[in-house]
Every structure is written in structure tokens, then in C-alpha cells.
Image (spheres, rainbow, N blue to C red):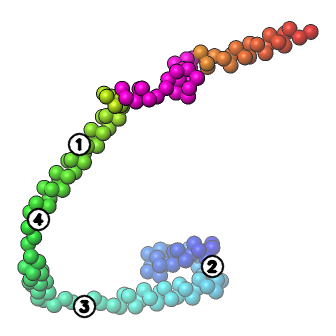
Amino acid sequence: MKCNEIQELMPDLAAGLTAATPELEEHIQACGECGPKLKEFRQTMALLDEWQAPEPSPYFDTRLQARLREEAAKRPARWWHWIRRPAMAGALALVMVVGVTIFQRSTVKGPVGNMLAGIVDTTPGTAVGDLQALEKNDDLYANFDELDDLQVQQDVNATP
């Protein structure tokens, strides 16, 4: 086994959650780095097992609740506090309505569409016109490869 693999297993080995295999024990005995590190882990786990958490004061909960009430009383009530949540909901609804409206109007219609139609030149020979012609006749242009292959075959057959 490699040291990296064993170092990942060390916390579980030290806590006794994982049993050591013979191969693992052999590596720990032979390796000068893994053996001492496992010993340190075991010492740390033993110290943690001995440690006991201090008991809280019997009046801790009562004092905490009183302190929370004091802090809440110190905070002045703001005039916008009662309106904050409905205002957020209204703003969210407004954003959603605007988003849906923009999404539905993504295609240009009406006077703006008519105005753009006059600006865009769709005559043959222009970029937009050529793209529209390609789009309309895509089936015809797709078969040009077959015509080229047919012409090559005729040229080969005609050659003496």
C-alpha cells in the first residue's frame, strides 16, 4: 500500500472504526513516516476520549431568552418593515410580466417590423438575399454533390 492511501485511513484506524489488515500493519511497521503518525493519531484520540464537555448553567436557557427579548426591544420598528415583503412580491411579479412580454415579442411585428423591412436589403446578390435564397432552395443545393459525382463518372468513361 502507498503512504497516501494509509494516511487517508489513519483517523479511522486511530479511532478503532476500521480494522487493520495484515498488509496495512506490515506497511505501518516498515514505514518511518506512517508509524509515528498513527501513534500520534492514537494519542490524540485518547485525549479526546478523556475530555468531557462542561455542563451549562441551569439558568442558561432563561438568560438566553431574556437577552433575546432585550435585543428585540432595542431594535426600533421601521416604517417600511410591514411593506417589505409585499413590495418584494410585487417587484418579482413585475419582473416576471416584463420578461414574459419581452419573450413573446421576440419576433419583430408591427410598425417596427415594417420599418426594419425597408432597411434590410433582400435583393439577390446581397448577403441577406443570398442567405434567403439558400434557405429556400436547400434541397436543390444539397443534390449538387450528386451532379458533380455524375459528371466525374462521365469524364472517366469518356477518356480513351
- Range covered by the magenta-colored residues: 114-139
Residue 19 horizontal/vertical position (percent): 49, 75
- Mark closest to the chain's N terminus, 2 or 1: 2
Q: Which residue is mark 2?
A: 27
- 93 is higher (above) or lower (below) than 120: below
Which quarter of the image is occupied by the N terminus? bottom right
Q: Are marks 2 and 4 in contact (CB under 8 Å)?
A: no
Q: Which residue is mark 3?
A: 54
For badge 2, the amino acid type reads His
Give the residue displayed 55% in from the left and 17% down from the top: 137
Q: Which residue is mark 4?
A: 80
For badge 3, the amino acid type reads Pro
Look at discs 2 and 1 and give the one toward the viewer: 1
Does residue 33 appear left or right of residue 150 in this picture? left
Local SS, label 4: loop
Question: What is the CA distance from the residue labelled 2 to the residue labelled 1?
Answer: 67 Å
Local SS, label 1: helix
